[in-house]
Amino acid sequence: MPPNVARLPRNSAGRPVPGNIAWYEADDDGAILVTRDDELGGHVTCPCTPGNGTPRFGEQCPVRQRQLMLQRCCGLCTQAIEPTAQMVFVGEIDAQYYLEPPLHPLCAAYALQVCPVLHAAGERIEVALTQSYTLAEDRITGVSANGTLRRSTFPFGDPVAHHLAVLEFYLAFPDTPERLTAPTWLTQRGPRVCTVNGGSSNRK
Ligand SMILES: [Zn+2]
Ligand SMILES: [Zn+2]
C-alpha cells in the first residue's frame, strides 16, 4: 500500500477510502445542495468531511472532485501530481473523458489490484497514461418529469454556462493519452519497478 494511501481515513472494514469519495453522516438526507458565486455560477456544494460518517464507494464528493481535478491532485491519495510526471486515468475502453480525477501510477496500480470492482472488470478496464489533461464542466441543466437530472458538458469557465446550468463535476480529457488494458499495464509495470534510474543494482 502506498504510504499516502495508508494515511487515508478508513471505512468500517479497515479499507482506505479514496480522497474523492463522498461521506454521509447519520442526519444527511442526500439532498443535492446548490449554491452560487461569481467564480462558478450555480454549483453543487457538499458539507461532507472525510473520516466523518460512512463513505459511499462509487459516489464522488462534488467539492473534492472539483478540487482534485483543478489542482492536478491524485483522486486516491489526494497528493499533488508533479507537473512533468505521468499520470493515470482509469476507465472503460476508449473513454474520451474521465469523471474520476487522475492517479499517481503507484496509486493506480494499487487501486487496480485491491478494488473489487476494477479487479473484476479486468480487460474491460483501460488505463490512459498522459502528462496533461483539459477540463470541461459537467453541469445540471434541468430535471425531467420523472426526476432524472438532465446534464450537459460545457467548456471550462464558459461564462454563459454560469447562468444556464449548475456545475457538479469537472470532466478530464487526457491530452494524447497512451492507452493500455489494465492487466497489460500492470504486467508491464512489474519489471520496471526494479530498473528505476540510479537503482541500487550496481552497488557492490
Ligand atoms: Zn462532500
Ligand atoms: Zn496518489
Image: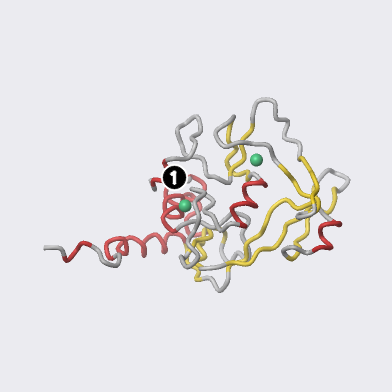
Residue in the picture at 46% in, 55% down: 108
Side of 7 relative to 162 (left or right): left
Side of 25 relative to 204 (left or right): right
Side of 46 relative to 158 (left or right): left
The N terminus is located in which quarter?
top left
Mark 1 vs ligand 2: CB under 8 Å?
yes
The C terminus is located in which quarter?
bottom left
Mark 1 — residue? Answer: 5
Q: Decide: is 129 above or below 107.
A: below
Q: Nearer the viewer, residue 13 or 8?
A: 8
Side of 43 relative to 164 (left or right): left
Q: Crowding near pointer 1: few (<14 within 10 Å), some, many (20+)?
A: many
Q: Decide: is 182 above or below 3.
A: below
Residue 38, position in %: x, y? 80, 54
Residue in the picture at 84% in, 63% down: 160
Q: As drawn, which residue projects farthest toward the bottom?
A: 176
Q: Quadrant of ligand 1?
A: top right
Q: As drawn, which residue projects farthest toward the left?
A: 204
Residue in the picture at 86% in, 56% down: 163
